[in-house]
Structure formats: C-alpha cells, structure tokens
Amino acid sequence: MVAVGSAILLSGSADDKHISIYSNAASYTLPVVERNGMDYVGLLELLEPLGTVSAKTNGQRWKFRYYEVESEFTAGKTRARVRGKDFDLPANFLLENGRGLVPLSSLSALLPRILGGPVTFHESARRLFIGNVAVHFTAQVSKTEPSKLVMEFTAPVNPTISTEPGKLRMVFTHEPLVEPGSQSLTFDSKIISSASYQENDGAAEIVVNGSVPLLATFGNDGRTITVAPPPTAATQTPPAQPAVKPTTAPQLLASTGAPVARSYVVVIDASHGGDERGAALSDQLAEKDVTLALARRLRLELGARGITALLVRDADNALTLDQRATMANAAHPAIYICLHAASEGNGVRLYAPLVPAAAENRGPFLDWNAAQAAYLTASQTAETSLAAELQNRRVPSRSLIAALRPLNNVTAPAVAVEVAPPAADVSELNSLAYQQLIASSLAAGIAAARDKLETAP
Amino acid sequence: MIPRHLIIGIAVMLAVALGMSFYVLRMRRGERAESAVASSRPVTPPVSGPTEQVTLYVAYDDAGVLRPTPARIPLPAGRQERAEELLRALLGLYLDKPSPHPLGMGSEVRAVYLVDPGLVVLDLNAAFADGHRSGVLVEELTMASLVQTLAANIPGIARVKILVDGKERETLAGHADLSNFYDVSTMNQLVAQMSAGQ
C-alpha cells in the first residue's frame, strides 16, 4: 500500500509520464520511470489494486506472487520465470530499493501470463485495458437547428472539459474510452464541423471543432454528452476575439464593445462536484449532491415557466471556477445562478457579487477578476426579485454581498444562492418538499425579474 | 486456614489499590485533554506591558453578524506588531470555549505585513484554512471579522490580502475568495448590510 501511495503521490508532477490502467476492479494511473532510455513501471504497484500480491527480495532475485501465481525475476537480467516457465523480457529487469521494475513494452505479453486473461495495451499512449472493459462511443450531429453533436457512450463518463475559441476539449483519464472507427470525424454542419479522437500519456481526448462557442451538457446518467452552441451563440457570427478566458493567457476577457442581445436563458451552476465535495453537511450528505439535485429541480421549474435553463454541470464532475465562468459567459445568459448549500443557519441566503475595486481594464479587454463590474446593478435587481419571491412563500431569506468566485468573472447578472435547512434538521436539505419550495421560489423570482433584466445592459 | 482479619485486610488493600488506579487514570485523561486544549492555542508568548482599548469585530454565527466588541489588550508600539497582536486576540476569542464563531484547532496568525500605501498582507497558518468550516456565510464572517478588526484599529488600511502558509490559495474552505484583495470600503458595505438585516 505504501508503494502504491508513493506511486500515486509521485504522479503529481506535470512533466512525469503516466500509465493508466483500466479494469473491472479499479481504474488508476501510475507513474512511469525512464531507465536506460526505456520506460519502466513497478510490477507490484501495477497489480496491487487488482488482487493479493506479495514480493520478496533475495539478493538480486525478486520473487513476486499474484494470488497463487509465482514469478521470479533477476536484477539486470532479461530471463524470468512465470508460472514455472521461462519468460524473456525485452529489456533487463531492474530492482531499486526492493521495488521490481519491468519494461513497459513487456506488459502485453507478461500480464496475460500472470493474470491468465486478455490484456490490451496501447503502448504509445500508455493505456492498459485488463479484460473486456472498453467504453465505446458514437457521435452524430442532429438535423435540428441549431445543430448539436450527440455523443453516446456505453458506460457513464466524466471527462474534464475545457473550451477555447472554436474548440471544446474533453479529456478522459479514468474512463477506458477507445477510438471509434476513425480518429477523425467530419460532420455536415456549419456550426460543428468535425471532431477528433486521440490518446496520449494515459488519457483519451476528444476535440470538437465548431465555428461558435460550444457548451457540453451531460445526460442519461453520464452516458450522453451533447455538444451544442448556447442558444444565442448559434445565431451569431464567430466572435472576432475570444469570448472566454483562455486557460494560459493573461486574465483578460474580451469585450464585444456593444451589448449582446440575449434571449432569456438562465445558467444554473451547481457548485462543487467530483472530488471537490464542498461542505460536509452531515456524515452522509455532501454539498455537491444537494446543489446538483436543486439545480435539476430549478431547471424543471424554469422549464415549466417557458424559460430555457442550462446546467453548468449535470453530473458529479469537477470543474474549476474559471471553467464555470467560461461556460457561463459562452452561453450569454440573461442571469447566472450559482447554488450552494450550508448546514448552519436556516432559510436561504442570496449573494450579489462583491467585485474588487482595483480592476485593470486594458482597452476593450476587461479584467477577468472584475468582469462582473458592469452587471452589478442588474445582479442586485435579480437578487431583490429572488428575495421577494422567497418572502412571498414565507421562506426566510437574507440578501448580502460576497467575494465568491466565479461571480466576479461572469459577464451577466449573477446571484449566488446558499440554501440552509428550514430548521435544525440538516437532512431536510435533501428533502423533495423543501427543494421544491426553494426551486419554485427561485424560478418565480427569475421569471419576475425578466422584464428588468432583458432591458439591462 | 487463613485468619479472617487477614482476608479483610487484603480485601481492603485491594480495594484501595483499585481506587488509586482509577484515580490516576482519571488524572492522566484530564491532563491529556488539557494539553490538547492548550495545543490549540497560539504558541506565541503574550505581549506584556500597558493595555489599550481596541475594537474587535467579532463574528456571531447564530445571528450571522459582526459585532464591534471593545477589549483591552497589551499592544506593542510598532504598527505591524500591533496588527499581529490584534488578530491574535481575535483568534484567541474564537478558539475559546464557548466560541461565537469556532475556528479549527491550532488556527494562528503567522505574520502580518504592512505594505504602504494601505495594503496589509496577512499570512495565516494552514490549520486556520484547513480546519475552517465550509460555507459561504461562515467563511465570509471570518474574512470580514479579520479585515474590519484591522481597519478599525490600524489607521490607513485600504486593502487586505490573505495568504495561507505564505502561499496564495484560491478559497478559504471552498467559498470565500482568497485570490483577490479585500477592499476595506466594500467590507464596510458588507458589515453594514449584515447589521441592517438584524
């Protein structure tokens, strides 16, 4: 376990090489070390998550056991014995501080001997598939207007998503995704022209190319990803300058100079997600789960009022604050609602953005940290409307301001909503009735603010 | 045949020995608990000297507000040292039991740097951030309390930047933004808003 722990810790450096292992028992990533110009991996670390393993060093000999299967390797030699038979490694076996290292290129032949089952190794991308675990996908552009790309996966997926002008990039590290028939897919659509698949350093990547900013939404419990332009972006010509924060560029946001005419689209951001659980509301209840459930309910309530709502996340996936703001800005929403949950206090707390005073705008570019500045009045208008509807339904509410990202980075009226339990019982946060009450109040507040927000800059 | 008085004597001695063992065990547990409490407090030696009247902006979780609270604490002469002592007094109050706004054990101010004009860089230890409760309001109360206490007692402070263990950090405990500066003027606005809701 210590070895695996060390290996996982070591995998943190961005410059290190990695190998991803996918199996029915576990999917994990290990660091790859380079020795004498070849890539090596620790055999014990590789197989420990899959079953009972043990290793014993005796001088230059390293005896390894996986369940009942015994193997013996000798430091500095290519000849080994596996299941009582000779096995030749493509390069010398290495023994470093009791850790047995085997060449990466030996895995496709060595592992089936030890495991007694099929193994597929994509050596150039360092992705190892143990057993029949591959996740396949199809990608089709719908004939609807505007076009959207619907990707169906054979198992739930949770990629890291990033956007840049004209591209939406999905990186699959934990999923045994395999390439479709062709690495390059072209579509008969002016908005979404093509997509490409590639594998590298233990991960698979799908890049969707479009002529407008694209937004990905999850559905079918993570088995479907729909890539589409936000409702307003579909009718716009491609922007001359990036409308999103580039991940490596200085923290500047391009301004179009003139107000963008927007339809009444609401972006709902369920805060936290994935490994980032948010507040531990109780032993069983995490903030990320409450916010997602509430976001879905709010979307339904808005839909019932004829208002389009987009979720920043519709699955248990982690997004950075910059990614959230970028996705929200790309949708040009009429209002951005960020949902939080807390165990302390009661009722609902509404927060308008608190923008740092010293913004460094340069020409047409706005300071990323104060991109919200032009929308502060509209944000307060929205906050007031939400508070009024909560009050109408006798939900205790409080209106405040908060230095809470990504509100500062959103170029639309933005309000954060922190939902606390109605009384002392925290589990009520997850109750259908309470969530319904909050969602309907918020939806009514958003609908009531429509006239004012549609005329806002 | 063992004499009756000998049996009674041995029984009494055993009872006394058991009682003593139980008493010693209790004493040891008490010592451990005391030392745990003691270790949660800042280790910096208290400043001696004449005390001064200051105003601490104390966060109250139950009402979700900051309340200006007068206090007398010994303060050194230098502005920087005064700022550190002020915040140590504030944190000490939060680490006491019962606390109006409990902080994680071992929360401490590492250093306060006064950078002219009007900028304070406040370096808190990892225990402060790692042990902080997560939530928008609870984190905001902490930030507002620190900034307001500094601004109320050290003239000329306009902005505050928070570091944790000498490094930048994105949020305090998942919510309050630590990547930007806190403007005293906007925090005044927040404190006024909090009070208005009461």
Image (tube, coloured by chain):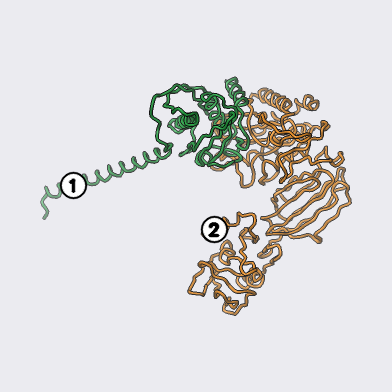
Chain colours: A orange, B green
Q: Secondary structure at mark 2?
A: helix
Query: Looking at this view, is B121 or A290 the one in front?
Result: B121
Q: Position of residue A391 (x, y in %)?
A: 66, 23
Query: Looking at this view, is A133 or A199 the one in front?
Result: A199
Residue B99 appears anywhere in the view: no
Above or below, A327 against A12 in this view is above
Residue A421 appears in which quarter of the rendering? top right
Q: Position of residue A313 (x, y in %)?
A: 70, 43
| Residue holding disc 2 | A6
| Residue holding disc 1 | B13
Q: Secondary structure at mark 1?
A: helix
Q: Position of residue A298 (x, y in %)?
A: 71, 35
A310 vs A103, left or right, is: right
| Amino acid bearing label 2 | Ser
Query: CB atoms at circles 2 and 1 under 8 Å apart?
Result: no
| Amino acid bearing label 1 | Met
Q: Residue at x 61, y 44 (%)?
A: A276
Q: Position of residue A24 (x, y in %)?
A: 64, 60
* Chain for disc number 1: B
Residue A77 appears in which quarter of the rendering? bottom right
Which of labels 2 and 1 is toward the front? 2
Q: Residue at x 41, y 40 (%)?
A: B39
Query: Looking at this view, is A326 or A423 the one in front?
Result: A326
Q: Residue at x 64, y 44 (%)?
A: A273
